[in-house]
Amino acid sequence: MARVNDSYLKLKAGYLFPEIGRRVKAFTDSNPDAKVIRLGIGDVTRPLVPAVLDAFHKAIDDLGTSEDFHGYGPEQGYKWLIDTIIEKSYKPLGVDLKTSEIFISDGSKCDTANILDIFDLSNRVAISDPVYPVYNDTNVMVGRTGEADEKGHYEGIVYMPCTEENNFSPALPKEKVDIIYLCFPNNPTGAVASKEVLKKWVDYALETDAVIFFDAAYEAFITEPGIPHSIYEIEGSKKCAIEFRSFSKTAGFTGVRCAFTVVPEALTARSESGRAVNLNPLWNRRQSTKFNGLSYPVQRAAQAVYSDEGWKQVQDVIDYYMENARIIREGLQSIGIICHGGVNSPYIWLKTPEGVSSWDFFDKLLIEANVVGTPGSGFGPAGEGYFRLSAFGDRDQIEEAVDRIKKNLG
Ligand SMILES: *Cc1c(COP(=O)(O)O)cnc(C)c1O
């Protein structure tokens, strides 16, 4: 009989969203007239913008002509998309990247998971708590950890708590680690990192020979000036950081799928014998072997995000979500709820009232205001006592939800 990958048996059953679904169903079954508003799931709701849609349509038509038909494309992505990204997204930040340093893919979820392929299992990994669960579970799947304890922390992973005390910005690990996951603006807490904070991490990684995995999925939601959009704005970072970016939240591509990963040519890690090895060719080899490139129409649609029209249209959608975030944040603050995030990220991370757990607050919000959010404890034990509301919704629904919360919880 074939053997399974036993590491999968260590995974805790997907608990958070099924449990939310179960509680919402139980409530709506017994209250069929309640109009439940869902501000729980981290998915966009606004349609693709016209410039993107036009490019998408045109590219599909191209495929129906013998002149512009496209078969297999480069596994790394088309040069015209990569060069557009460099020109429009990195140059304005003062960051120079080469075409060979960017790899187009179908998502940051898979990239943050797949990147583990090119790193040895002996690496010690540091992960924030609370966290985007993919970082944790993919390390379990590859076999880097022991069993989970009753809190859900796996043996072998170094957890970095993010709480009000450290302003949701993790402290440098006390023990030696080799790989550090950072996500700014953060999901779920909405926290951002200043240049000083990122510099602290880059200096630390350079000193200790660690690699930073920097997830910048929400960089487009930064509204305050001076906050870095890319880790490469920090000097020395090309020697220690891989950056993940996605069109999912930026341009509503959660269902279309397009993302990219930056692996600078200057970035190295050591081989078993202690030799410094460049990571860029390893990732290139991995992608060329296991990935066959993203579809031509999707890459054309992504390129259109950077056209003059597309950029403005995408920015309007982001502004719409960020206005939602302001309405939620200020509405909750007006009844004395302490809110974090929602300024440079589409998530509001609120503190539940004294003595009310994340799940108790979930029930209270559902029963009293018919609003669904996400319990902070679902993102890790340090999220206990917090609650996430998403600003990805329709304006009238957001306003209605905030009115109900003010009326019933105020
Ligand atoms: C949504 C999200 C992503 C994007 O994932 P895709 O696979 O590109 O859709 C990446 N990181 C975090 C933290 C996210 O919340």
Image: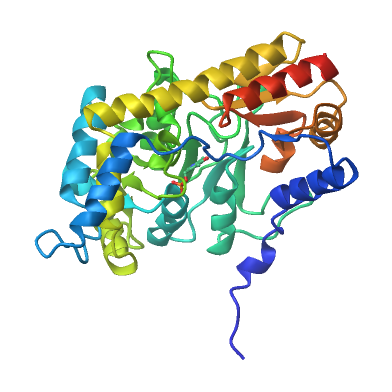
Residue furthest to the left in view is 67
Q: Residue at x 88, y 40 (%)?
A: 31
Towards the viewer: 210 or 61: 61
- The residue located at (45%, 55%) in the rendering is 110
Query: Left of 42 or right of it: where is 292?
Result: left
On the rendered structure, is 360 left or right of 284?
A: right
Residue 163 seen anywhere in this rendered image of the structure: yes
Residue nearest the observer in this picture, 105 or 241: 105
Q: As drawn, is 204 to the left or to the right of 339?
A: left
Residue sitting at the far bottom: 1
x and y, in percent, of residue 41 in the image = 62, 40
Q: Above or below — where is 358 with respect to 323?
A: below
Figure coloring:
rainbow
Residue extending furthest front? 33
Picture quadrant where residue 329 is located: top right
In this rendering, is residue 304 above or below 12?
Answer: above
Q: Residue 358, image x and y in percent?
A: 79, 33
Residue beneath the point at 39% across and 20% down: 195
**Total marks in image:** 0
- Residue 207 x %, y %: 38, 35
Q: Quadrant of residue 43?
A: top right
Q: Residue at x 48, y 54 (%)?
A: 123
**The C terminus - image quarter:** top right
Residue 268: image location, x then y, percent: 29, 48
Which quarter shows the N terminus? Answer: bottom right
Position of 215 relative to 149 (above/below): above
Q: Could one spot residue 95 in this view of the protein? A: no
The foreground one among 158 and 315 is: 315
Q: Which residue is farthest right?
A: 30
